[in-house]
């Protein structure tokens, strides 16, 4: 196979494999436990942002610039969420703040996660192409490492889409569509790698910003509605498990 063929095959297979594996795992657990597993999703998001994405971004970018990028990203996602909220608000009544409203958040968290995940997948494609251009063996190892890292994160993303009111099939479809950004990034990198590498830190910073914002601004406040000790301990354990799953996979692939 040619280098380009390897890049196309791995970029497509990697994105589809990580998304479908995450969806299958979520199906096995059951959507009736989605609210409980939101705590796991928070841990997976924060773990991916602070243990995986930001360290990679700092390897390629200046710390002050990266901090500014994350700050800018958080502000952008705040504005984006406001726009989504306004779409659901009419005059003095806003269903997003109605105490009788459904448990989901009308797609706010899901939309932000899809935007951030698309940035992340795009960068993954650039990394895969760069590795294959170095050598086929390095490309395969890099792709396997990316897929391994993506699965626990995609579980969290899928749970958040369900929490936001998406159906199972719609959540899977949007996640698969977002995964195509891996192929886009890989193709652009293959034909213009020298220009795109300069954008890697910025794209990684924006991806991390979306994950941090959704976890801290949208999901964690919902956990405070349950103040009993048992629920609090359960939330802490699941958040820790989410972080540990990212750290464990990272250690397993030796990065």
Image (cartoon, grey):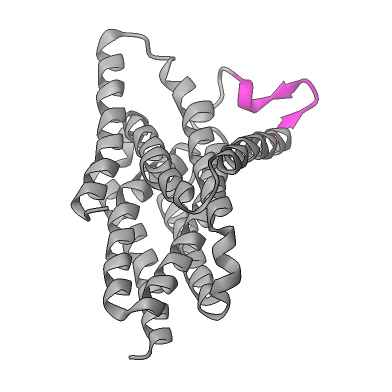
Tell me the residue at 45%/56% (across/down).
175
Tell whether 20 sits left or right of 208: left
Residue 19 position in % (x across, y down): 36, 58
In the image, the segment drawn in magenta is: 88-98
**Position of 233 relative to 48 (above/below):** above
Specify whether residue 173 is painted magenta. no
- Residue 97 appears at what percent x and percent y? 62, 21
Corner quadrant of residue 94: top right
Q: Using residue 4 as the reference point, say whether residue 90 is left or right of it.
A: right
Residue 173, position as x, y percentages in the image? 46, 60
Q: Work out whether 133 lies above or below 215.
A: below
Identify the residue at image location x=42%, y=79%: 8
Location of the N terminus by quadrant is bottom left
* Residue 94 part of the magenta segment: yes
Does residue 103 appear in the picture of this structure?
no
Q: Residue at x 43, y 72 (%)?
A: 130
Residue at x 65%, y 38% (from the top left corner): 72
Left or right, 201 with respect to 148, comes to right
From the viewer's side, name the closer residue of 64 and 91: 64
Front residue (pair 110, 237): 237
Q: Which residue of the protein is positioned furthest toward the right in this rendering?
A: 91
In the orientation shown, which residue stands out farthest toward the top?
Answer: 228
- Furthest toward the bottom, the residue is 1
Q: Position of residue 120 (x, y in %)?
A: 48, 54
Q: In this rendered view, identify the residue nearer to me: 104 or 70.
A: 70
| Residue sitting nearer the eye, 53 or 220 | 53
Task: Give left or right: position of 57 versus 82.
Answer: left
- Residue 89 in sight: yes
């Amino acid at each position: 196979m040619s280098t380009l063929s390897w890049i196309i095959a791995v970029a497509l297979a990697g994105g589809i494999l990580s998304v479908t594996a995450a969806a299958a795992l979520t199906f096995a657990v059951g959507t009736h436990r989605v609210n409980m597993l939101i705590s796991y999703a928070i841990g997976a998001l924060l773990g991916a942002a602070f243990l995986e994405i930001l360290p990679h971004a700092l390897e390629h970018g200046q710390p002050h610039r990266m901090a500014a990028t994350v700050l800018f990203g958080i502000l952008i996602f705040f504005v984006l969420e406001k726009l989504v909220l306004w779409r659901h608000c009419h005059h003095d009544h806003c269903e997003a703040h109605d105490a009788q409203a459904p448990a989901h958040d009308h797609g706010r968290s899901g939309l932000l996660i899809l935007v951030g995940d698309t940035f992340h997948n795009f960068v993954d494609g650039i990394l895969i192409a760069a590795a294959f251009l170095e050598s086929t063996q390095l490309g395969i190892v890099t792709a396997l490492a990316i897929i391994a890292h993506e699965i626990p994160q995609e579980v969290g993303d899928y749970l958040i889409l369900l929490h936001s009111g998406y159906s199972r099939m719609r959540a899977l479809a949007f996640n698969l569509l977002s995964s195509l950004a891996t192929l886009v990034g890989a193709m652009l990198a293959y034909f213009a790698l020298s220009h795109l590498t300069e954008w890697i830190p910025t794209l990684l910073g924006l991806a991390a910003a979306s994950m941090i914002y959704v976890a801290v601004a949208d999901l964690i406040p919902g956990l405070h509605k349950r103040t009993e000790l048992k629920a609090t301990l359960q939330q802490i354990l699941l958040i820790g498990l989410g972080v540990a799953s990212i750290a464990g996979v990272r250690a397993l692939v030796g990065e």
